[in-house]
Image (cartoon, helix red, strand yellow):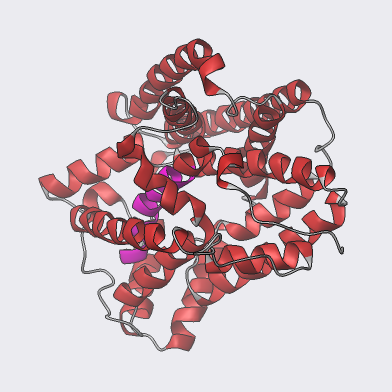
């Protein structure tokens, strides 16, 4: 461990990855905001928010954002892990122990985030699935990519068929996922509760989503995306996007058309559990692929167009920015902060996201001009390598 651990040079960064990460952080924030300000887990959003502006804002998020940006970020996570492994091996460092430390700290950060800040944490899952990824990391790029695709499609097709069968044989009123009593309890806790009561509600909300019953779907909907991203990294798809532009464009257009079609299904047909599942589980990742490849095809000579550059500042500090969004949002909405929980609609919540994200762009640009890493990224890297890296830029 006495080898020098130097920061990633600007010329060695893949600009499209930073832009995609920043774009994913924006999309994730748009979806998360619904749960930051309202008991989104337990309500029918189209009844809870009934104004035309709210319905339009929610429909936009549901069709173009919901279930599309965590898949994008998951694929980027897998892509980044392969880059990290290749970098470690090139320096003569063992990847297994380094990755174990990296995932262990991510797990700790996720636990703190989930139970002390916000119940919708994704970091715990990423850490656990990161350990699983180590079992596949030596596969070739082609095999890793194909394995990821098959592990995604086959289980989720089975789950979708089971849900459609359930819809056929179980009365609709017995299949409602909405829970008015739970929504009321959430409102009472987050609006007026003490920190202890809010923490108890947070744990209740987290366990309602993360449990043994939901584990198979969670694994099938996230982990294969790590493999797809990792396979793409091994095939060097984003290092020289100009060489793949024609291929990327074709896949992007097909994914965009198919993704929008899947996402529109509950609006075109009578919504039910099966259609809702297909909408997100297949439509979401298809749009994620379209968004990611859309960014890739706009990269020329290693540089992105100017209007995308601000996203790269946020993307370089993606973990810090993700946690900041939770901290500032829970402060705005929870009782131990400003107490606006349940008092903001989908439309105004979306505007708030735009305002906060613009602030994040400004701060991230300021930060990246002076430091190599964000504060959480610096801590994460230090623990990963057991060595304090250079942080402040010279000059």
User: Residue drawn at (47%, 31%), measured in percent from left and top?
Assistant: 292
Q: Toward the viewer: 87 or 232?
A: 87
Q: How many labels does the image show?
A: 0
Q: Which residue is drawn at 45% across and 29% down?
A: 283
State the residue at coordinates (34%, 51%).
Answer: 30
Is the stretch drawn in magenta largely helix, strand or loop? helix
Q: Nearer the viewer, residue 356 or 84?
A: 84
Can you give x and y, in whole percent of width and height, for residue 296 in the image?
Answer: 47, 27
The N terminus: image quadrant: bottom right
370 w.r.t. 255: above or below: below
In the rendering, at what x and y percent does residue 319 appear?
53, 59
- Between 257 and 215, the residue placed more toward the observer is 257
Q: Is residue 275 left or right of residue 100?
A: left
Q: What residue span does the magenta drawing correspond to? A: 21-37
x, y percentage for residue 114? 55, 68
Q: Seen in the image, is 138 located left or right of residue 372?
A: right
Residue at 47% over, 75% down: 201
Q: Is 316 colored magenta in this rendering?
A: no
Residue reaching furthest front? 395
| Residue 129 in view | yes
Q: Is residue 148 above or below residue 132?
A: above
Q: Can residue 212 be seen in this view?
A: no
**Image quarter for residue 387?**
bottom right
Q: Determine whether 151 is above or below 134 in the image.
A: above
Extreme left residue here?
52
Q: Is residue 27 highlighted in magenta?
A: yes
Rendered location of residue 42, percent (x, y): 39, 58
Q: Which of 391 and 332 is in front in this view?
A: 391
């Amino acid at each position: 461990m006495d080898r020098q651990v130097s920061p990633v040079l600007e010329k060695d960064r893949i600009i499209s990855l930073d832009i995609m990460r920043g774009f994913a952080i924006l999309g994730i924030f748009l979806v998360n905001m619904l749960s930051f300000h309202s008991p989104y887990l337990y309500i029918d959003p189209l009844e809870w928010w009934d104004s035309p502006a709210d319905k339009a804002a929610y429909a936009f998020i549901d069709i173009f954002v919901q279930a599309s940006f965590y898949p994008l970020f998951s694929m980027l996570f897998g892509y980044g892990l392969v880059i990290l492994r290749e970098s470690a091996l090139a320096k003569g460092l063992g990847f297994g122990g380094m990755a174990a430390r990296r995932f262990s700290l991510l797990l700790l950060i996720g636990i703190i985030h989930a139970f002390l800040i916000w119940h919708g944490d994704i970091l715990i899952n990423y850490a656990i699935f990161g350990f699983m990824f180590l079992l596949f990391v030596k596969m070739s790029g082609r095999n890793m990519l194909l394995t990821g695709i098959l592990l995604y499609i086959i289980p989720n097709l089975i789950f979708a068929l089971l849900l459609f069968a359930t819809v056929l044989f179980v009365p609709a009123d017995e299949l409602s996922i909405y829970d008015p009593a739970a929504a009321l309890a959430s409102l009472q806790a987050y609006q007026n509760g003490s920190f202890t009561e809010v923490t108890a509600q947070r744990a209740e909300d987290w366990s309602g989503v993360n449990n043994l019953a939901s584990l198979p779907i969670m694994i099938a909907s996230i982990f294969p995306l790590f493999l797809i991203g990792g396979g793409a990294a091994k095939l060097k798809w984003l290092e020289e996007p100009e060489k793949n532009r024609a291929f990327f464009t074709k896949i992007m257009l097909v994914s965009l058309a198919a993704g929008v079609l899947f996402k529109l299904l509950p609006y075109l047909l009578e919504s039910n559990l099966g259609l809702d599942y297909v909408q997100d589980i297949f439509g979401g990742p298809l749009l994620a692929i379209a968004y990611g490849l859309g960014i890739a095809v706009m990269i020329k000579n290693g540089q992105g167009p100017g209007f995308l550059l601000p996203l790269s500042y946020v993307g370089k500090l993606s973990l810090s920015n993700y946690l900041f969004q939770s901290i500032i949002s829970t402060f705005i909405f929870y009782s131990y902060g400003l107490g606006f929980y349940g008092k903001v609609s989908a439309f105004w919540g979306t505007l708030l996201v735009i305002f906060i994200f613009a602030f994040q762009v400004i701060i991230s640009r300021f930060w990246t001009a002076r430091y190599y890493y964000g504060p959480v990224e610096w801590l994460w890297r230090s623990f990963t390598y057991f060595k304090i890296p250079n942080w402040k830029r010279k000059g």
